[in-house]
Amino acid sequence: MKVFKFGGASVKDAPSIKNVSAILTRFSGQKIIVVVSAMGKTTNKLEEIVAAYLAQDQKTFVGLVDELQAYHLEIAAGLFPDKHFHIFELLDDIFTELRAQIQRKPSDNHAFVYDQIVSLGELLSSRIVNAYLLDQGFNSQWLDARSIIRTDNKYQEGQVDWTKTEALCQHYILPLLETHDILMTQGFIGHTSEGFTTTLGREGSDYSAGILAYCCAAKDVTIWKDVPGMLNADPKYFSDTQLLEHISFKEAIELSYYGASVIHPKTVQPLQQKDIPLYVKSFLDPEASGTKISSSALHDSKIPSFIVKKEQLLLTISSKDFSFIAEKHLSDIFETLAHLQIPINIMQNSALNFSILVDRKKVKMEALNAAFVANYSIRYNEGLELVTIRHYDQHTIDQMTTGKEIILEQRTRNTARFVLRYLE
Ligand code: ASP
Ligand code: MG
């Protein structure tokens, strides 16, 4: 059995959903678990609805819900000319339930509220796509991922209970695949042991595909995207990108750790554990081979990869009493950063300073200052970029650093990283 994941862009309108169906036709006769994301920008819209609901801004959330419903109805109308088709009733029920929910007073647990509402995007999407597949004659069955993927109670970033999820997969999915070719389910969502909905973190649908593949021991996984596969650089910033045709699990994990955003960072680990190959392919050109990610590291160093993170902030932290930055200070600093939920992109220490590079957008300056003011002084260096080169050589380093000031650099055998500032 295979696992396919279709992201938001691949189901953003009626023609896109027809394309998904055309792709599935190419695999007829095979058993496929299909994981879909919410359509287009639905998740962002649902996040806005949650924010307006929590702020009790009735006018805004009612308007947003109307827009979201109209968007889904338009897609459904493009797929099912018959207005009496049962999907319209199903969509109506989901929106009626949402409207009822946001008329009630919100719970104080905002992350909980978020998950109950934002999860609707994937439910809507999977319902519509499945109805279309059935209409096209596929032997497909809709499956609620909330009866399969079990997480803890950490809302907005549910941690998977692998033992339970594996047991649920074996119990529900395998028998269903004996009588159906396609199981249509949702990415991004799971459930707690009490039966409440959780989400796995933004962009978590890839991860769902990885979880299901692991727990059902799938033959392979394909993530269908609007790019030809994994590229060696982001085409937004580089004009001559190259396709990475075949890389190892380890290389894929490294690339996504450094910030390559083609696949969700947690996706690869479960696949690596069971040696399940992952393909990244274009839904616009399904015949093209795309990228294969597997245990073979044979091709890893053939092509250098470039990862650029913009809008970086360098924080240099020193103790107020000019004491050495030693273990006690470091554990203190790490604890504070973990508490403030600020991920570190790169770090370096000297006798008196500890420097960390972070995404400017993830830092709440006031909270940061308040947390450090008693014992430390902080200096800020803004407007920087972090460049990571995998499988570098002098030529690629020159290419990335010429004309820029190098503020900090670190090299290992395979990876060179530079914190850079553009020269005026
Ligand atoms: N719909 C969710 C999001 O946009 C999950 C996903 O697309 O992977 O974050
Ligand atoms: Mg997405």
Image (cartoon, rainbow, N blue to C red):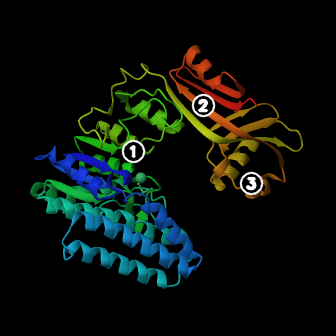
- Between the C-alphas of marks 3 and 2, the distance is 24 Å
From the viewer's perspective, is residue 243 above or below residue 279?
Answer: above
Q: How crowded is mark 1: few (under 14 residues within 10 Å), some or many (20 or more)?
A: many
Disc 3, SS:
helix
Q: Please, what is the three-letter code of the amino acid marked with disc 3? A: Met
Ligand 1 quadrant in view: bottom left
> Nearest the camera: 204 or 52?
52
Q: Where is residue 272 in the image (x, y as percent from the top left)?
A: 35, 37
Q: Residue at point 48% right, 31% down?
A: 233
**SS type, badge 2:** strand
Question: What amino acid is at disc 2?
Answer: Val
Q: Which residue is drawn at 27% across and 67% down?
A: 76
Structural distance between the alpha carbons of marks 2 and 1: 23 Å
Reply above or below: 31 against 40: above
The residue indicated by pointer 3 is: 365
Q: Name the residue under label 1.
A: 267
Q: In this view, does 345 lie to the left or right of 131?
A: right
